[in-house]
Image (cartoon, grey):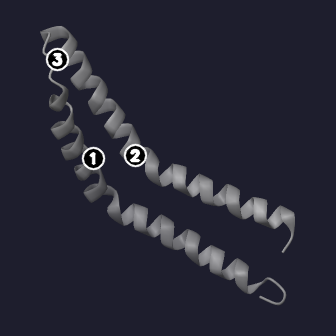
Amino acid sequence: MDDVLVIKILREALMVTMIVSAPILGVGMIVGLIISIFQTTTSIQEQTLTFVPKIIAIFAVVVISASWIISTLVTYTKNLFMLIGRIPGG
């Protein structure tokens, strides 16, 4: 296995990880920002106020985008297995 091939596999793994996790992290960040602005304007400084809306929003995003996430990961895994099959002696 060539060093260039290993770097390519690692780069692709990191890209797939970032692409798959971006919607979940983005929604969590946006909901946290909205709740933070709400807390600042109303002077409510309850720490648990941000927890429930973030959990609900992240759960909704996971449910909505689950098929896309699974198909992306399956495509990456199929490509990885085909690449392993082409390695001499592997």
Quadrant the N terminus occupies: bottom right
Q: Check disc 1 and report the residue beneath it.
A: 58
Q: First in sequence: mark 2 or mark 3?
A: 2
Task: Tell me whether the residue at label 2 lies in contact with that at label 3, contact meaning CB atoms closer than 8 angstroms.
Answer: no
**Circle 1: residue type:** Ile
> Residues under labels 1 and 3: Cα distance?
22 Å
Query: Which secondary structure, mark 2?
Result: helix
Residue 90 in picture, x, y percent from top left: 77, 88
Question: From the viewer's perspective, is residue 47 above or below residue 63?
Answer: above
Q: Quadrant of residue 4?
A: bottom right
Q: Nearer the viewer, mark 2 or mark 1?
A: 1
Q: Is tag 1's residue or tag 3's residue first in the polypeptide sequence? A: 3
Numbered label attached to residue 11: none
Q: Residue at x 62, y 60 (%)?
A: 13
Percent coordinates x, y for residue 54 in the rendering: 24, 39
Q: CA distance from mark 2 to mark 1?
A: 9 Å
- The amino acid type of the residue labelled 2 equals Pro
Q: Is residue 70 left or right of residue 28?
A: right
User: Which dot, 1 or 3, sits closer to the camera?
Assistant: 3
| Residue at the bottom extreme, as displayed | 89
Q: Nearer the viewer, residue 74 or 40?
A: 40
Within-10-Å neighbours for mark 2: few <14, some 14–19, many 20+: some
Which is more toward the observer, 7 or 70? 7
Q: Amino acid at mark 3?
A: Gln
The numbered disc on residue 45 is 3
Crowding around mark 1 (Cα neighbors within 10 Å: few <14, some 14 to 19, many 20+) is many
Query: Which residue is disc 2 drawn over?
Result: 23
